[in-house]
């Protein structure tokens, strides 16, 4: 049991260390020294070791709780699957290959040590159930209007449930329970491309929350995507990332699904991890206009 008055809740950094640093400046400036991280630490942005160095530093200095996201599954699975082939220049998996090449055994070990879900109890306030996607699966989305969401909330013992994965900041109440999503630090949706997170603050035996959205240096991020080799490794994936930072309206999953549809329409089949670039190009042009 930990005694804390305020806690920063961050999710879905996806390797955007520049947005991450901006959030930390705000949090530490508020005097907050406790963190809950809901997973997906790396994936879409360059220089992943910079994000890992920040995480390790926070882990050493402050009270931190870490959860495993679905992105961490990719790195862990890649370590043990010797038959896995991620092609450079393939927009579907190129970013994952770029990221994995920059990971160390320490990083993989850290990801393997993380729980999918955990109950966190703070002295004097209600317990918190934290997860990435849902308490059942780290790749399950819990939207307020989702058919699965109410059932999951009813099954959970705690009053407060924290989740990420959707990249959409928001809250939802159901039968006395509260679902809170801090949004995404690195690749938020419907935010105007801002870095998003949440602060929990203790109100007697209850928790209040404050959603935070911050601008950050996107030009620097885009420049590093180009100069790091990441853009060459996954050209159309990076275009979606850039579009998301500037507009924040269309997810990678939406464009991926459309590229798969186009591939199936023409070839009769499609493997998500090996979509020819021509279909990525068509999907990006159709949905993003670029």
Image (cartoon, helix red, strand yellow):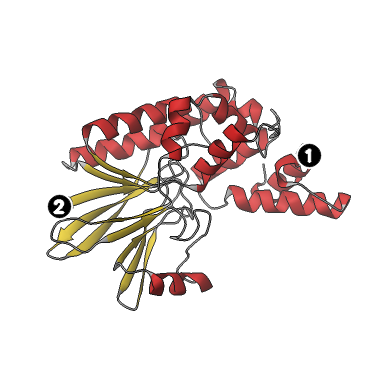
Q: On the image, which quarter does residue 92 sit in?
A: top right
Secondary structure category for the residue under label 1: loop
Residue beneath the point at 34% across and 49% down: 197
Left or right: where does residue 235 sit relative to residue 148?
right
Residue beneath the point at 17% across and 62% down: 125
Left or right: where does residue 260 sit relative to residue 141?
right
Whether pointer 1 and pointer 2 mark residues with C-beta atoms closer than 8 Å, the reply is: no
Q: What residue would you read off at disc 1?
A: 276
Q: Which mark is residue 5?
A: 2
Q: Is residue 242 visible?
A: no
Q: Is residue 184 visible?
A: yes
Secondary structure category for the residue under label 2: loop
Q: Tell me where residue 4 appears, x and y as whole percent.
A: 15, 50
Q: Tell me where residue 250 appears, x and y as whole percent.
A: 57, 52
Residue beneath the point at 33% across and 30% down: 56
- State the CA–CA distance, disc 1 to disc 2: 51 Å
Mark 2 neighbour class, 10 Å CA radius: few under 14, some 14 to 19, many 20 or more:
some
Q: Tell me where residue 169 appears, x and y as whole percent.
A: 40, 57
| 269 lies above or below 152 | above
Q: On the image, which quarter does residue 86 sit in?
A: top right
Q: Tell me where residue 205 appears, x and y as whole percent.
A: 15, 66
Which of the two marks, 1 or 2, is nearer to us in this view? Answer: 2
Going from N to C along the chain, the mark reached first, 1 or 2, is: 2
Q: Which mark is residue 117?
A: none
Residue extending farthest to the right is 267
Number of marks drawn: 2
| 173 lies above or below 57 | below
The quarter in which the C terminus is drawn is top right
Mark 1 neighbour class, 10 Å CA radius: few under 14, some 14 to 19, many 20 or more:
some
Residue beneath the point at 45% across and 46% down: 193
């Amino acid at each position: 049991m930990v005694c804390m008055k305020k806690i920063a809740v961050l999710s879905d950094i996806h390797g955007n260390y520049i947005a991450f640093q901006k959030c930390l400046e705000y949090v530490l400036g508020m005097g907050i020294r406790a963190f809950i991280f809901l997973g997906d630490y790396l994936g879409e942005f360059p220089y992943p070791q910079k994000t890992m160095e920040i995480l390790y530093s926070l882990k050493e200095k402050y009270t931190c709780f870490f959860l495993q996201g679905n992105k961490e599954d990719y790195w862990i699975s890649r370590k043990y699957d010797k038959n896995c082939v991620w092609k450079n220049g393939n927009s579907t998996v190129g970013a994952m290959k770029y990221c994995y090449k920059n990971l160390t055994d320490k990083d993989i070990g850290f990801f393997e040590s993380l729980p999918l879900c955990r109950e966190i109890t703070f002295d004097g306030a209600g317990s918190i159930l934290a997860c990435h996607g849902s308490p059942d699966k780290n790749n399950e989305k819990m939207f307020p209007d989702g058919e699965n969401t109410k059932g999951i909330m009813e099954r959970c013992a705690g009053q407060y449930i924290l989740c990420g994965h959707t990249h959409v900041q928001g809250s939802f109440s159901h039968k006395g329970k509260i679902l809170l999503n801090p949004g995404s630090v690195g690749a938020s949706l419907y935010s105007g491309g801002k870095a998003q997170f949440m602060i929990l603050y203790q109100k007697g035996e209850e928790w209040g929350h404050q959603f935070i959205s911050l601008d950050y240096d996107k030009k620097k991020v885009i420049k590093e995507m180009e100069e790091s080799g990441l853009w060459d490794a996954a050209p159309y994936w990076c275009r979606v990332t850039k579009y998301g930072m500037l507009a924040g309206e269309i997810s990678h999953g939406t464009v991926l699904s459309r590229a798969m549809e186009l591939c199936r329409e023409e070839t009769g089949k499609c493997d998500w991890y090996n979509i020819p670039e021509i279909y990525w190009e068509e999907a990006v042009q159709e949905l993003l206009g670029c």
